Amino acid sequence: MKLPPKLKKKLMIITAIICMVISVSVSFGKQHNITILEALDDIITYPIEKLITVAKNKISGIIKSFKDIENLNLTNKKLQQENEELLYNNIRLMQLEKENILLKDLLDIKNRYKSYPSFGANVIGKDAGNWYKVFTIDKGETQGVSESDIVLANGALVGIVNEVNLLSSIILSIIDDRSTISVEVMRSGDTGILSGQIELSNKGLANLEVDINSDIVVGDQIITSHISDKFPPGILIGEVIEVIEINNGLVKNALVLPFVDFSTLKYVLLIERNEAIN
Amino acid sequence: MIKLRWFITISILVMSLALQNTLMEFIRIGGISPNFLTMLVVAFSLLRGKKEGTIIGLLGGLLYDLSYSHIFGIYSIGYMIVGFCCGKLHYFCYRETRILPLTCTCFASLFINTITILRFILIGNLNFLYFYFCKVLPELIYTAVLTLIIYRCIYFINDRLEEQEKKSRKLF
């Protein structure tokens, strides 16, 4: 189909204007929390992604159940032994807890360790490209997720809610190149900055930067620090697997292996941010 | 008939995005995944010309931008340019040969990844050797190999659609 040059020019101008209007509306909407286009996209893709994930989990669950019967018998025996030990330990710890509460009351720091309100969610998608480590979960604004909620799995930190859509929301994981967290070495109490790096993120590692004088060795556990205003203090993150000395006289680097396995992440736990900080 | 054509095209784009987000972990090799959107945009625009190629590129990029992109518009504009440039080659494309789609996909993948690297340059990470040899090159090879299959599928679908359109044209 040949178009006359005048009409062609008009068509080009119209296309350019449409592009500009779309990008302006999206960036304006992001500032003021009006996300029409995102909601539309969400409504289209959510059912498909959810369906595929449910089917995938069902099928892999059935296959796995056949494999696991023998293993289960063995682990069952082990767990029973462990259970007896734990029962004994539990009683001992109960006594300690009572003592702890008494002491905390004395110190008046009880309010700091409230049990945070939380709810679970399923991971239904991952960033398709090779550059970033972002996840989609199946709960959104309608289910009460809000921006910068904290995301955990297996008791360790996964990341933070970066973007909330109508039905789903997007999590920025701690190994992503865009994420930086203030952390603390559990043993010595030294603080540092944990940042994701593009070179490490495919191996599931993150980079920790601490002061040159701080005390850090391989095997140290890393938790979120008391300085951070994004995360509540004391959430487990990972373990130091390598300390790298740099000759600039200012900082030391360390590689941290998170306790969460990001390649097989399925279920996560969300903590409401406002409750956690106050 | 044109409605059917666009309905099928858009549903292919949406399905590919959804599949890429959910099932990609099964076909990742060494943490590297192929990029289906590049293949689809290149295949469609080679078969249908620059006007439709541009629109398909814009739509696909927009879908990707809305769901994951940190900086809105990078992929919409990027895939739009890819669609336009491959659409320009529409007249040189013998549909049965696979050399042109293969080379086009290679260049498109290189182009899209270079756009992505711009973000890393802006924050001061200039590790180009790592970017190109550990991220871009494996993805390019993987994508190019899979193009041979995907192009076949798109060619088949497009052929069927065009046959349908011809039939309906004869009626009137």
Image: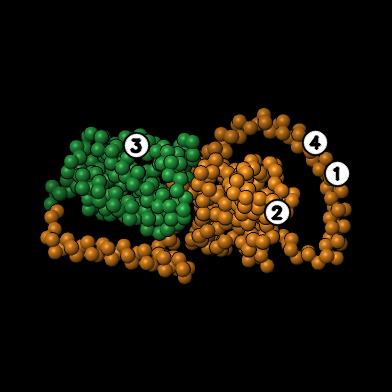
Tell which of B109 and A185 is nearer to you: A185
Distance of mark 2 from mark 3, alpha carbons? 48 Å
Q: Is residue B167 above or below residue A111?
A: above
> Which residue appears at 64% of the width and 61% of the height?
A228
Q: Looking at the image, is mark 2 or mark 4 nearer the viewer?
A: 2
Distance of label 4 from label 1 (alpha carbons): 11 Å
Is mark 2 in CB contact (under 8 Å) with mark 4?
A: no
Q: Position of residue B2 (x, y in %)?
A: 23, 53
- Give the residue number, with chain letter if any, for mark 2: A190
Foreground pick, A132 / A34: A132
Q: Nearer the viewer, residue A36 or A69?
A: A36
Instruction: Name the mark nearer the viewer: 2 or 3.
Output: 2
Chain of the residue that carries numbered disc 2 in the rendered image: A
* Amino acid identity at mark 3: Ala
Classify 10 Å Cα crowding around label 2: few (below 14), some (14-19), many (20 and above): some
Residue holding disc 4 = A81
Near-viewer residue (A263 or B157): A263
Does A216 sit left or right of A15 as displayed?
right
Between circles 4 and 3, the one closer to the viewer is: 3
The chain letter corresponding to orange is A
Q: CA distance from mark 2 to mark 4?
A: 38 Å
Q: Which residue is mark 3?
A: B144
**Is the residue at mark 3 from the same chain as the one at mark 1?**
no
* Amino acid type for the residue under numbered disc 1: Tyr
Q: Which residue is mark 1?
A: A88
The CA span between labels 1 and 2 is 34 Å
Q: CA distance from mark 4 to mark 3?
A: 55 Å
From the viewer's perspective, is B90 left or right of A169?
left
